[in-house]
């Protein structure tokens, strides 16, 4: 069944590819974009001009959707970017969650959020902000699918691929297997495929999807 999907962050690294897949699958997609960024929206999707940090600029469109995908965030996260995480990641999630909460008594039914794997030995500031974002979704009582990848490999994001042999060794050792799997690397196509699955299979209650399941869902949904 076709979904009416609103996407924040739909012109970014993961978002643009997801929008392309959603349109190809026959879904009705709206993409939030700042003025001047309209050209980055994938063909076939409707452009909603607005500011991801200010819900009043886009909330009326969320009210007409049944699924919200939140992908807005600082590109290339790094340990020294905590101020940016709070100014962009946290602020935009607050705005998105507020817009979705205001719409949930209508047709709106499902919020999808890409968080980050936890706990982890590095990127503490990033993890703190993403956990705060997850807490906001719970406070707003939104039914959500929360993905927790660690690092998504793809164009311009490939350097951790050199660690794949190390991951394989750690996954073969009992004492390190769980952590290695939870903090494993996810391919760009796997992340996009898992997000498409979440759109087409709304949650009945909030669910957390970590790296092993992201990979499994991508493989499963690629068959359809």
Image (tube, grey):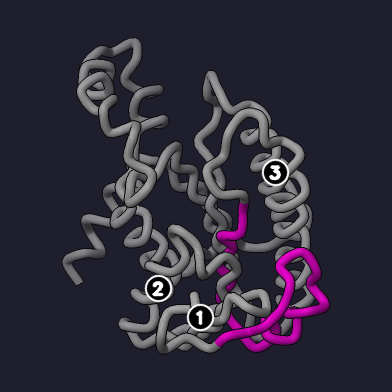
Q: Position of residue 53 (x, y in %)?
A: 77, 64
Number of numbered tags placed on the structure image: 3
The magenta-colored residue range is 47-73
Q: Classify mark 1: helix, strand or loop.
A: helix
User: Dot 3, how many residues are within 10 Å of its Cα: few (below 14), some (14-19), or many (20+)?
Assistant: many
Q: First in sequence: mark 1 or mark 3?
A: 1
- Give the farthest residue toward the left: 223
Relative height, residue 49 to residue 117 (above, below): below
Which is in the foreground here, disc 1 or disc 3? 1
Q: Quadrant of the N terminus?
A: bottom left
Q: Residue at x 71, y 67 (%)?
A: 52
Which is nearer the eye, 110 or 11?
11
Q: First in sequence: mark 2 or mark 3?
A: 3
Q: First in sequence: mark 2 or mark 1?
A: 1
Relative height, residue 104 to residue 69 (above, below): below
Compared across the picture, whether 202 is left or right of 186 comes to right
- The residue tagged 3 is 85
Q: Position of residue 30 (x, y in %)?
A: 55, 83
Which is nearer the eye, 67 or 124?
124
Q: Position of residue 145 (x, y in %)?
A: 53, 57
User: Dot 1, how many residues are within 10 Å of its Cα: few (below 14), some (14-19), or many (20+)?
Assistant: few
User: Dot 2, how many residues are within 10 Å of its Cα: few (below 14), some (14-19), or many (20+)?
Assistant: some
Q: Residue at x 74, y 71 (%)?
A: 51
Q: Residue at x 56, y 72 (%)?
A: 7
Q: Quadrant of residue 212?
A: top left
In the drawing, what numbered circle is on residue 154? none
Q: Kindly report the distance in space between the C-alpha atoms of the residues bearing marks 2 and 1.
A: 27 Å
- The residue tagged 1 is 39
Residue 211 lies in the magenta stretch: no
Compared across the picture, whether 140 is left or right of 67 comes to right
- The residue tagged 2 is 200
Compared across the picture, whether 152 is left or right of 126 comes to left
């Amino acid at each position: 069944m076709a979904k009416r999907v609103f996407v924040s962050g739909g012109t970014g690294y993961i978002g643009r590819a997801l929008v392309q897949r959603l349109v190809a699958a026959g879904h009705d997609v709206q993409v939030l974009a700042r003025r001047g960024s309209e050209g980055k929206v994938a063909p076939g999707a409707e452009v909603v001009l607005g500011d991801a940090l200010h819900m009043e600029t886009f909330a009326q469109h969320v009210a007409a959707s049944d699924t919200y995908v939140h992908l807005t965030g600082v590109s290339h996260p790094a340990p020294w970017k905590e101020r940016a995480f709070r100014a962009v990641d946290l602020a935009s999630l607050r705005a998105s969650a507020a817009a979705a909460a205001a719409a949930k008594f209508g047709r709106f039914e499902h919020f999808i959020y890409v968080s980050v794997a936890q706990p982890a030995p590095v990127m503490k500031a990033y993890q703190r902000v993403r956990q705060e974002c997850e807490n906001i979704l719970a406070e707003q009582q939104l039914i959500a699918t929360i993905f927790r990848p660690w690092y998504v490999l793809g164009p311009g994001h490939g350097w951790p691929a050199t660690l794949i042999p190390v991951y394989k060794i750690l996954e073969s050792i009992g004492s390190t297997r769980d952590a290695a799997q939870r903090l494993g690397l996810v391919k760009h196509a796997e992340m996009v495929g898992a997000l498409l699955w979440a759109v087409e299979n709304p949650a009945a209650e909030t669910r957390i999807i970590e790296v092993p399941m992201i990979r499994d869902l991508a493989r499963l949904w690629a068959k359809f």
